[in-house]
Amino acid sequence: MSIKLGVVMDPIESITVKKDTTLAMLLAAQKRGWIIHYMLQSDLCMDQGTPRATMQTLSVMDNQEEWYELGNKTDRALSELDFILMRKDPPFNLDYIYTTYLLEQAQREGTFIVNDPKSLRDCNEKLFATQFPQCCPPLLVACCENRLKEFHEEHEDVIYKPLDGMGGASIFRVMKDDANLSVVIETLTNSGQRQIMAQKYIPEITNGDKRILLINGEPVDYALARVPAIGESRGNLAAGGNGKAQELSDRDRWICKEVGPALIEKGLLFVGLDVIGDYLTEINVTSPTCLREIDAAFGLDIAGDLMDCIQQKL
């Protein structure tokens, strides 16, 4: 019997075909003869304690002109699916949290969820990294202006960023004697009402912010270094960075070895680590990307490896 896969994602008509990691996963699943059921976050519901969704069967093509074909809409229980890929991009807001509760109920009814819904809630992508202080640069999480200023006084060159941001949004570099220190802290903390992260600036960002992908706690042998545009301190592709695929360093592999067991324990099957220089800065669990760029550079099939791993767990 063919495996029935569900995917919760952003509208498929709006994806960038050449770069979209979710599309690569769906292509790999379809290649195996699996049946794909497409859902938006808004399609999910709970009816008399049963998680359900309005689904459409989905066929995908690796074609930038025409990359998908949807079938008729049907209402089904999520328990009818063998597994679900939760690939909705941030923001990580209340709607996202409510969706994880629905998926968690489906998990209890026997559907395998990638990644584990409880861990999606628990593992804030910036705070989760702080559970591995041996891998991280000097950092502080606080909303107190005095603490955040003291951190700057100690380290002089600091990155300030929100805990719920994505794509490099609202990230500020504040150097020594920068007159904007107070207003940056005031803005990001909402005048002391919101926790933010302060992180010592890592000069090696000029060599790229590396995205390292792990499947079931084991790293892919290559990473995508996202090199900032001229005049930028952010390597995010969404902020204009350029991607350069490269082999993992010994330090990269050590970081993966430190983090990997916790990922397995938490049911985080597909994860992206962000590493700058020798330091872990984020652990991306919601919808990690950069798979297609690494595949293209080294002739890999990372999505296929992920599908093989999932099949072994069903």
Image (tube, helix red, strand yellow):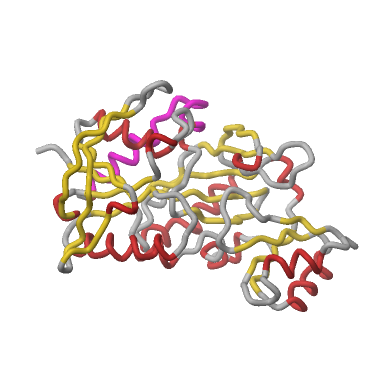
Residue at image position (84%, 58%) is: 175
Measuring from the top left, give residue 3's x and y in whole percent: 17, 41
Measuring from the top left, give residue 115's x and y in whole percent: 35, 54
Residue at image position (66%, 74%) is: 142
Residue at image position (53%, 48%) is: 253
62 horizontally vs 234: left or right: left
Vertically, is 71 above or below 256?
Answer: above
145 horizontally vs 98: left or right: right
* Residue placed furthest toward the left: 1
Picture mark count: 0
Vertically, is 164 above or below 243?
Answer: below
Image-quadrant location for residue 170:
bottom right
* Residue placed furthest toward the right: 177
Residue at image position (80%, 74%) is: 150
Measuring from the top left, give residue 66's x and y in whole percent: 37, 23
Vertically, is 229 above or below 117?
Answer: above
194 horizontally vs 55: left or right: right
In-front residue for pair 41/279: 41
Question: Which residues, given as a range, are shown in magenta?
Answer: 293-312
Q: Is residue 311 magenta?
A: yes
Image quadrant in which the N terminus is located: top left
166 horizontally vs 202: left or right: left
Q: Is residue 64 magenta?
A: no
Measuring from the top left, give residue 135's x and y in whole percent: 60, 60
In-front residue for pair 93/155: 93
Give the prevailing secondary structure in the magenta stretch.
helix
